[in-house]
Amino acid sequence: MPRVLLAVGGVTALLCLAHLFRAPSAPYVVVNVSARARAPRSADPAARAPAAPPSRDLGSASRLVERTCATYRIECVPGSMPAAGRITGVVPTPPARAFCKGHGDVPPRERALCACPAEPLRSVARPGSTVCDAGAHYLAYQCSSVPLLTPTPATAAAAARGDSGVGRAVDVLLVVSECLGHGLFAQVERVINQLRYAARHNLVPVVYLGEHVLTSPDDCLAGRNGYWEARALTEGGLDSVWDYYFEPVSAYRLGSPTLPNGSRVRSVRVASLPLLYKDQLLGGFDGGRLVSAYGRTDVYEPSWWLDRRRTAHAYLRRHVRVRAPLLARAADARARWLRGRAGAPMLGVHLRGTDKVVRRKVAPARYYAFVDAFLAAHPRALVFVATDDATYLSEMVRRYGDAVVFRQPGYRSANVIRDAALGARDKGADALLDALLLSRCDFLLKTTSALSEFAIWLNLTLHERHIDLQFEDGGASQRFPAWAAHLAPAGAGRTRALGRRSDSESRTAPAKG
């Protein structure tokens, strides 16, 4: 099981990588990197992503961190539905040529070698089902500060027998991400649905969104998590993207053979996420009611959305806690904006641009009639703009001037999630802070997006106090509020003097363009 030692603090980089995958028995890869230089290279032979720039609020000082890089064998749990696998051990890491380089990065001649996407544990005998065949397995590569599986002799024997052997036994569900292209809130959605799976199957959940998404090497969705950052580990001791932003969801800690109450871990399992979502389409798991930020776009179905929003809200209240420093930053920003304007309503506007690919982009001009109407009804109102697109923010500031408040000025990258030039942890924090602030708004204008949907999951009253501009019927299927009586044709309305009001965390003016 190869291990990686990350030592941050020197000025040179010593990379002992040459024989890592030719000789799996080699125990260590030592990386010594300056804290102000690039982050350590991944041990993944398939991806050498450029390092992210230094992160803000890095926490504790640099320290030596030992990591275990391994390829795990995940074997079908007979009878599990949708299919789940049990981590049964470690095998030699396949050669680099066995790893798919990720959808979009694969040369045409190599694309046939990738499964797009793969369906780990898909049944060969019953290909239309979501169960797995006894003995079926797949391999998954991960680097972690502790091994994903550290069975004692007693727990190893228990797994073979199917019982604990000693005391009460529990099965752990390793809650993971399976797609390199998922944004932070798409990953949160997957976490919620896996928490539901854990509750249904009486499993103890532990969320681990590690450096690599957990799927088979030939999956075109395999690769590095776009939010994982080496500096968070070497300087803050955080090895899971989840832990950057949220508290643990259970008392179990990764790699431990027991729970704090003394219960022994019988097995560590992983749900096959492609089969979990496929099962939703078949109406299987939980009646086909998985939490989702995406639905039909021709007409708005309030009951369909409310059902899923209530479920997400309940799981967030019971299991998901945002870290206190992030809550405090959001509260401080809101307080600064409202200083001297007590009682002023706030309109939340989420504009998704840059790398939006699942649905069509909706330009700022489509929002204007609604923003104009809200300001006509509430002249003292503020307009909080949350966007990943600097150009979109500039357009809103030009039109509404000092009514606009914002936290950060957006990006110009065509792919915010995968752009290694952007601070990995910071861009996730920016997104979460935007979502927290949107959830505190009096009304929300949005399009289909996991970020703005998360805001509604946090604050269910926004289910009745939002308009989604993604729908193709122009809003005919949605209930408009009283202030919509001020609606004018798109593009009409007053234009305020150029200006802006922003959180002190974001002093950079948006680009004019």
Image: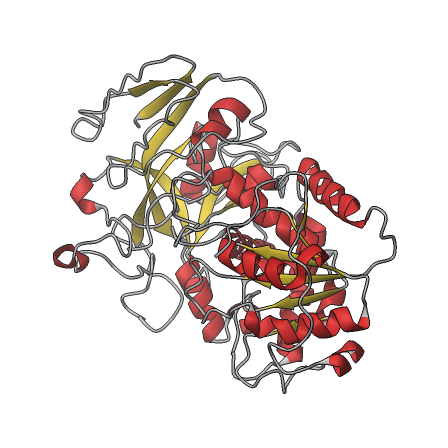
As drawn, the residue found furthest toward the left would be 109
Which residue is found at the position 73% from the left and 75% from the top?
373
As drawn, the residue found furthest toward the top would be 10
Which residue is found at the position 60% from the left and 76% from the top?
491
Which residue is found at the position 32% from the left and 30% from the top?
41
- Compared to 171, does 62 lie above or below? above
The answer, for residue 170, to whether it is visible in the render is no
User: Which image quarter holds the N terminus?
Assistant: top left
Q: Seen in the image, is 214 located left or right of residue 205?
A: left
- Colour logic: secondary structure
Residue 118, percent across and down? 30, 59
Residue 504, percent across and down? 67, 39
- Between 225 and 99, the one nearer to me in the picture: 225
- Compared to 388, does 291 lie above or below? below
Which residue is found at the position 54% from the left and 25% from the top?
236
As drawn, the residue found furthest toward the front would be 497
- Between 120 and 350, the one nearer to me in the picture: 350
